[in-house]
Image (cartoon, rainbow, N blue to C red):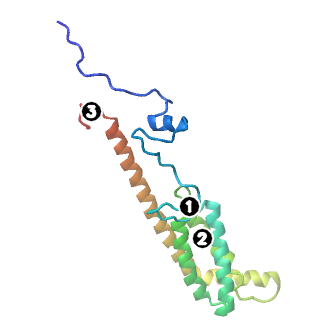
Amino acid sequence: MEQHRTRPPQYRPRRGAPVPAQAGRAAGGGVGRDGAAARRPAPAGIRQPGRTSRPRLTGLGAGLFCGASMFALACLDALLFDGSATVYGVLFLPVCVLTGLWVRPGDLVTAPVVLPIAFAFGLPPIAEDGGGGVGGHLMGLVTALALQAGWLYGGTLAAVLVVAVRRIRLMNRRRAARQRDRAREVLPGRRPR
């Protein structure tokens, strides 16, 4: 005697077919299956309760932020502290950390790259003139870069550490999401391996 399947077939929507929540919104209802209003993301610029908004910089935005910040801080240093290279180096460190924290996850690699460029971009207001003319000013910049290499390496290293921690956390979140998706795909009667 032939035995037939006793378990009912599982419902699987066709590829490309909207899930029930999307179908209700597409029809203009905006209501989920349980009758509650569907949650929509808040428009840009409006904070949702309980969520902290943090700036997200693109690679270009990170470069502009660092360059403009370092130039403004160098001008402030020249006015208040007579162009102290140590003050400039100390002010470079928080800019490095903020850039590492604010850059978008897709542009994490750009943060350590733009920081040395921004450091050099901010040096002209505090660099000593090595003589006269363009050659003397270039020699002053090269000398300032050579003497402040410790601050430059320290700030870049701080940004690399921040970016590395963020990258590891992002990879762990993605791995956990993949594992959750695999666990959901397992048939209800079977155990995951």
Labels 1, 2: front one: 1
Left or right, 60 with reference to 21 = right
Question: At 44% across and 40% down in the image, what residue appears?
Answer: 32
Question: At 51% across and 70% down in the image, what residue appears?
Answer: 159
Q: Secondary structure at mark 3?
A: loop
Disc ID at residue 188: 3
Question: At 49% across and 29% down in the image, what residue appears?
Answer: 17
Quadrant of res 188: top left
Q: Amino acid at mark 2?
A: Leu
Q: Amino acid at mark 3?
A: Pro
First in residue order: circle 3 vs circle 2: 2
Q: Which residue is mark 1?
A: 46
For the C terminus, the quadrant is: top left
Count of labels shown? Answer: 3
Disc ID at residue 115: 2
Category of crowding for the residue at label 2, using alpha-carbon neighbours closer than 10 angstroms: few (below 14), some (14–19), many (at least 20): many
First in residue order: circle 1 vs circle 2: 1
